[in-house]
């Protein structure tokens, strides 16, 4: 009986490790700076520049706080699901109100080049546990990959926003939800086997996914605050 046998599978040959968030799970992160991205119709998404075990990266495009629809005053209406996730952070961080975003420079461009974004500075430097669930689909003849933020928990005791408000059972929900740690969503007839083959092949059909981007830098830089931009304005 052999002690071990050689493997030439790509996953077994890859050298080195990484603290990039690249799969479903619960991740301890420092939210260095949340920032707002607005599309051409005025819909706002909050993205997160985070530090996970000394690896700086961005979790993009999944906490949508306003929709494209307008109210009677011409403002974009709130996105119920996105605002629920966003509000968890406010409770966990004991933040009563978030000021309008401020134009700031973050090292999130290609090769950590600084990029000007609209930072929510009241929510900067937050230690939390972030639950991420990978979602794969097929759109415009390309496989899509997205990191969906499902929940946040307080870093010190794994408490949810609800547990904090009720002042009881801190960490109970976190423990119950561990069974979902490796859950992955497959849409548009995608399969686990097909997605693994695509990943092992270097995601070559699509290159880097726009909905699952990340960026790194050698040092955390403080945002350079500048002009304020009205959040959700016309």
Image (cartoon, rainbow, N blue to C red):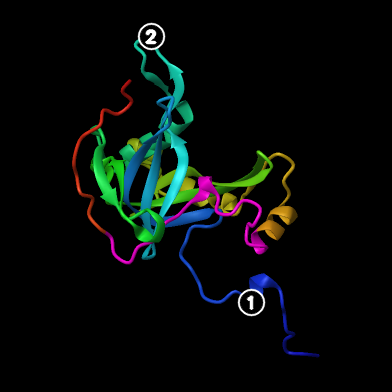
For the point 73% across and 49% down, the residue is 191
Determine whether, in the image, residue 81 is placed left or right of residue 162: right
Quadrant into which the N terminus falls: bottom right
For the point 18% across and 41% down, the residue is 226
Q: At which x and y percent is residue 190? A: 72, 46
Q: In this view, does 220 lie above or below 3?
A: above
**Category of crowding for the residue at label 1, using alpha-carbon neighbours closer than 10 angstroms: few (below 14), some (14–19), many (at least 20):** few
| Residue linked to disc 2 | 72
Can residue 167 be spotted in the picture? Answer: no
**219 in the magenta segment:** yes
Please tell me the numbered disc located at residue 13. 1
For the point 72% across and 78% down, the residue is 8
Residue furthest to the right in view is 1
Q: At which x and y percent is residue 5? A: 74, 85
SS category of the residue bearing label 2: loop
Q: In this view, does 190 lie above or below 81?
A: below
Please tell me the numbered disc located at residue 117. none
Magenta stretch, residue numbers: 199-220
Give 61 or 40, whichever is nearer the viewer.
40
Quadrant into which the C terminus falls: top left
Location of residue 42 by image quarter: top left
Rounded to the nearest angstrom, the CA distance separating label 2 from label 1 is 58 Å
Residue furthest to the top in view is 72
């Amino acid at each position: 009986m052999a002690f071990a046998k050689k493997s030439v599978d790509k996953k077994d040959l890859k050298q080195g490790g990484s603290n990039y968030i690249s799969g479903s799970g619960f991740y301890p992160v420092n939210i260095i700076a949340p920032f707002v991205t607005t599309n051409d119709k005025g819909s706002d998404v909050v993205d997160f520049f985070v530090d996970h075990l000394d690896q700086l990266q961005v979790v993009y495009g999944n906490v949508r706080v306003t929709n494209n629809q307008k109210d009677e005053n011409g403002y974009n209406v709130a996105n119920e699901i996105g605002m629920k996730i966003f509000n968890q952070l406010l409770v966990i961080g004991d933040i009563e109100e978030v000021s309008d975003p401020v134009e700031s420079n973050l090292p999130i461009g290609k090769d950590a080049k600084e990029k000007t974004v609209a930072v929510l500075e009241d929510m900067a430097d937050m230690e939390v546990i972030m639950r991420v669930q990978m979602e794969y689909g097929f759109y415009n003849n390309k496989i899509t990959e997205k990191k969906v933020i499902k929940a946040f928990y307080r870093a010190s005791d794994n408490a949810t926003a609800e547990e904090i408000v009720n002042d009881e059972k801190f960490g109970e929900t976190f423990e119950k939800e561990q069974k979902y740690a490796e859950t992955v969503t497959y849409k548009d007839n995608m399969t686990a086997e097909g997605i693994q083959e695509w990943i092992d092949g270097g995601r070559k059909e699509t290159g880097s996914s726009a909905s699952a981007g990340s960026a790194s830098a050698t040092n955390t830089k403080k945002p350079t605050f500048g002009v304020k931009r009205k959040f959700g304005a016309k």
